[in-house]
Each structure stands twice: as structure tokens, then as C-alpha cells.
């Protein structure tokens, strides 16, 4: 390692990254644009991540060998499928270091997990009660609360962020009232990349006996989260953003809180006994898992977690920060580039615009070079309004992105500036 090279650690990691890339068939697929062969530079990981072969094999293997409905059939295959499904719950429990396996509820993703809490938790609130959010939330952690607010007469309050995209938690005392019943905050912004000071927010809320829901969609895939250490009351995340299958996700909730909430959806599995006029509710986690679940989704997420833990979540977090620093250093040299979100210690997300070029034109140009980024409001309209933009282009990293990917991205932006 060359100690004078500021990017020596990043360069030294490239062998490992290239080895890992070989696990992802899609990263090696050929692409052509206008008859020209391109290598895929996939920088849309905040949107969804690619899947390693072991996850693909697990999904196929589930259907080839073990498919049967869970928790219903008294036959060997049904028992095997149930073992796989409930084994995935144990896997998620250890991954998060949850205290109890019943605290792991399977959902179809972050969005459903938050809707579940918004509908059930707010059912016990009174008109005039308040929910505290932030101005940087994804619609998934905003609209469910707006819907609950309309239904139960609640008021929503918001912690603002500054021009660097840093959450202004110093405003917590002045925003706080004794009507606040829940705080719901993203661990990491999907637009700004800001990693929020969850420990401080949780300590502040808990000192006032108020629970905290964490939207972990952008955090759980990229850093180690220990729910007992963090002491969050709810945590939501999606499998598809962490190398797992789509249509699957997790709500973690503290046992005593989950037990107090009413059921979410009605149907099979969430009941113990049913009469024509009424039903007895099942215990957690089944109380919140009505209907036939996404069995292979659970198997696939467990395989993805095994994979990510082998790669190392601390390593992933460190590597993405190094790649972000390297890319930013080059990107800011391109004339006319504005980056939105410059919070210290932010995660591997770069939202940006180039003078006068519409984000969609920019991303279309990059796409022709094989560079996949996202353009739009990134499901965070209020955040975009606060930034004073309609849309931005967004490059987002995962551990399989290389220095070559970063160089190709910056070079394509530079060319776009010249050509558009
Ligand atoms: N919250 C954040 C911060 C996100 O980035 C996303 C996905 N873009 C979501 C919630 C919603 O996740 P999903 O669509 O997987 O439910």
C-alpha cells in the first residue's frame, strides 16, 4: 500500500470487490447502446440492488425442492417449507440482534412495514395527538402518517434539515410537545445520503416515554444495525435493497409494543379461532401476517443476509465511504455540478444536477454510456421542494461498485456537460 496515496485503502480493496462481482451474474451481462458494446455500471443501488448467485439459487431451490404452504399442511413438504420460513425469521433475529424471534414480522417491504405501524399504532391515539417526522422522509415514511392523521385527527410535525442536509436535532426541544406519541425517522436519507443521529433522537424521545420508528431501508443494507444497542422501538427495511428478493421485507418491533397493537389485515394465519361474527387474534408475529406469505422471499432474504455477513457489514460501510470520497473528489471538478447533501459521514449516495441540464436528460445520456443512475424526485417531493429543485440525478453505490465504475460515472457526467 502506498501511504502517500490518499486512496490507497480503496485501491487495496479492489481485488476483493472484483472477486465479489463475480457472484453477481447481471453485473457481467453484455449491454449494447447504438450498436456499441458497453459494460454495465450499475449506480442505482438505493433503488434496488443486484442479487448474487447464491440468492438466485436459493429462490430456484425453494421451488424445485421445498415448495408447500407454510403453517398449514401436515405433510413433510409443508413442514420443510415452514422450517425454511421460520428459519429465516431466526436468521433475521440474529442479524438484527433482536431479543425475541416474535419481534420479526415479515412484510412485503419497508412501505408495508410502516403502513402496518401507522394504521395499528395510530388506532390507539386521540384527536390532537402528534407524530414527529423529519423533512427528509421518503413518501413511504410520510404518506402513511398523513393518512393516519386524516383518519384519527392527528397533527404531523417535522424536524427540518440545514443546507448541507444535516438534520437539525438541536430544534427537538422547541418542536417537542407533550402530545407527541411517536417519532418516525429515516436512518439514512435516500436523496441526501445523510445518516441521522438515531441514538440521540431515540434517547431524547425515550426520556419522554415516546417510542421511535426507524426507516432502515437505506441503512440496514449498508451498515451493522443492532436493534438492542440502538434501542429503537420499530425498524422497517426491504429485502430487495440488500441483495435479497423483491416483494419482501421486515418490520422489527419490541415485543411489548407489538402485543398491544391491534391486528393489521384480516385473513388466514392471523387468527386463533373464528366464529361467524367474530375472531380471536393470533399471537405475534402471526397476528400481523395474514394470508399465505412470500415463502421464497424469506428463504432468499436469509441467503442474502448470510452473504452480506460473509462480505462484512462493517467492511461494506467503510468501503462505500471510501468510494464516495474518491468519486466526490473527481465529480466536484466537473464544471457546473451541484451536489445536494453534504452531511459529514454521509452514506454512498450522490444527488446532483449540472447547470441547465434536466436530470432526465443527464441520466439518459449516462445510460447511453452504460451508466445507470436514477433521475427524479426519488419519492421525496417535500425534500425536493425544500432543496428548490424538481428533480435530481442520483448515483448510489453498493459494495460491488469499483473505482472503474466511479471513473466511468464522472467521465460520463463530464461528457454530458460538453455535449448537452
Ligand atoms: N424509505 C426509504 C428511505 C427508501 O429509500 C425507500 C425505497 N426507495 C423506501 C422507504 C421504500 O421501500 P420499498 O419501496 O422497498 O417499500
Image: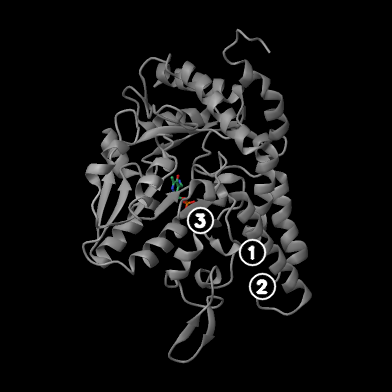
User: What residue would you read off at disc 2?
Assistant: 69
Q: Which mark is residue 128?
A: none
- Residue 192 vs residue 282, the one in the foreground: 282
Question: Looking at mark 3, is its residue's CB closer than 8 Å to ligand 1?
Answer: yes
With 97 as the anchor, is 153 left or right in this view?
left
- Whether residue 237 is visible here, answered yes or no, is yes
The picture places residue 210, in percent across and down from the top left corner, at 35, 55
- Residue 275 vs residue 295, the one in the foreground: 275
Graded by Cα atoms within 10 Å as few (under 14), some (14 to 19) or many (20 or more), the crowding at tag 1 reads many
Contact flag, marks 1 and 3 (Cβ < 8 Å): no
Contact flag, marks 1 and 2 (Cβ < 8 Å): yes
Q: Which mark is residue 295?
A: 1
Dot 1 or dot 2, earlier in sequence: 2
Count of residue discs: 3
Residue 282 to residue 345: above or below: below
Residue at image location 63% in from the left, 19% down from the top:
9
Label 2 to label 3: alpha-carbon separation: 20 Å
Residue at image location 63% in from the left, 60% down from the top:
89
Badge 1 marks a residue whose secondary structure is helix
Label 1 to label 2: alpha-carbon separation: 8 Å
Residue 415 to residue 33: above or below: above
- Furthest toward the bottom, the residue is 276
The picture places residue 325, in percent across and down from the top left corner, at 50, 22
Residue 52 to residue 20: above or below: below
With 213 as the anchor, is 106 left or right in this view?
right
Residue at image location 68% in from the left, 37% down from the top:
311
The picture places residue 99, in percent across and down from the top left corner, at 58, 57
User: What residue would you read off at disc 3?
Assistant: 109
Graded by Cα atoms within 10 Å as few (under 14), some (14 to 19) or many (20 or more), the crowding at tag 3 reads many
Badge 2 marks a residue whose secondary structure is loop
Question: Looking at mark 2, is its residue's CB closer than 8 Å to ligand 1?
Answer: no
Q: Quadrant of residue 357?
A: top left
Amino acid at each position: 500500500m502506498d501511504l502517500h496515496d490518499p486512496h490507497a485503502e480503496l485501491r487495496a480493496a479492489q481485488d476483493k470487490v472484483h472477486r465479489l462481482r463475480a457472484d453477481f451474474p447481471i453485473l457481467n451481462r453484455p449491454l449494447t447502446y447504438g450498436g456499441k458494446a458497453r459494460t454495465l455500471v450499475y449506480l442505482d443501488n438505493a433503488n434496488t440492488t443486484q442479487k448474487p448467485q447464491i440468492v438466485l439459487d436459493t429462490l430456484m431451490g425453494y421451488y424445485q425442492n421445498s415448495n408447500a404452504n407454510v403453517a398449514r399442511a401436515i405433510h413433510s413438504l409443508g413442514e420443510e417449507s415452514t422450517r425454511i420460513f421460520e428459519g429465516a425469521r431466526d436468521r433475521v433475529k440474529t442479524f438484527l440482534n433482536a431479543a425475541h424471534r416474535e419481534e420479526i414480522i415479515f412484510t412485503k417491504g419497508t412501505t408495508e412495514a410502516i403502513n402496518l405501524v401507522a394504521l395499528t399504532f395510530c388506532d390507539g391515539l386521540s384527536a390532537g395527538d402528534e407524530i414527529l417526522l423529519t423533512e427528509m422522509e421518503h413518501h413511504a415514511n410520510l404518506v402513511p402518517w398523513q393518512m393516519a392523521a386524516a383518519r384519527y385527527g392527528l397533527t404531523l410535525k417535522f424536524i427540518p434539515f440545514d443546507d448541507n442536509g444535516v438534520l437539525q436535532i438541536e430544534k427537538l426541544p422547541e418542536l417537542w410537545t407533550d402530545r407527541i406519541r411517536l417519532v418516525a425517522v429515516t436512518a439514512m436519507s435516500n436523496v441526501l445520503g445523510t445518516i441521522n443521529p438515531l441514538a440521540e433522537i431515540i434517547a431524547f424521545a425515550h426520556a419522554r416515554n415516546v417510542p421511535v420508528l426507524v426507516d432502515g431501508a437505506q441503512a440496514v443494507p449498508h451498515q451493522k444495525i443492532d436493534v438492542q444497542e440502538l434501542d429503537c422501538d420499530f425498524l422497517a427495511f426491504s429485502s430487495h435493497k440488500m441483495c435479497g428478493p423483491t416483494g419482501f421485507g421486515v418490520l422489527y418491533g419490541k415485543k411489548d409494543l407489538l402485543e398491544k397493537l391491534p391486528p393489521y389485515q384480516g385473513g388466514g394465519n392471523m387468527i386463533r379461532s373464528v366464529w361467524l361474527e367474530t375472531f380471536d387474534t393470533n399471537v405475534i408475529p402471526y397476528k400481523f401476517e395474514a394470508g399465505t406469505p412470500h415463502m421464497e422471499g424469506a428463504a432468499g432474504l436469509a441467503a442474502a443476509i448470510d452473504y452480506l455477513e460473509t462480505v462484512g457489514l462493517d467492511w461494506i460501510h467503510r468501503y462505500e465511504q471510501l468510494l464516495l470520497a474518491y468519486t466526490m473528489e473527481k465529480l466536484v471538478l466537473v464544471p457546473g455540478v451541484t451536489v445536494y447533501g453534504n452531511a459529514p459521514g454521509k452514506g454512498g449516495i450522490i444527488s446532483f444536477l449540472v447547470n441547465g441540464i434536466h436530470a432526465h436528460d443527464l441520466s439518459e445520456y449516462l445510460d447511453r454510456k452504460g451508466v445507470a443512475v436514477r433521475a427524479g424526485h426519488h419519492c421525496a417531493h417535500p425534500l425536493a421542494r425544500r432543496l428548490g429543485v424538481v428533480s435530481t440525478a442520483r448515483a448510489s453505490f453498493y459494495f460491488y461498485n469499483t473505482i472503474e465504475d466511479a471513473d466511468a460515472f464522472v467521465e460520463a457526467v463530464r461528457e454530458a456537460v460538453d455535449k448537452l
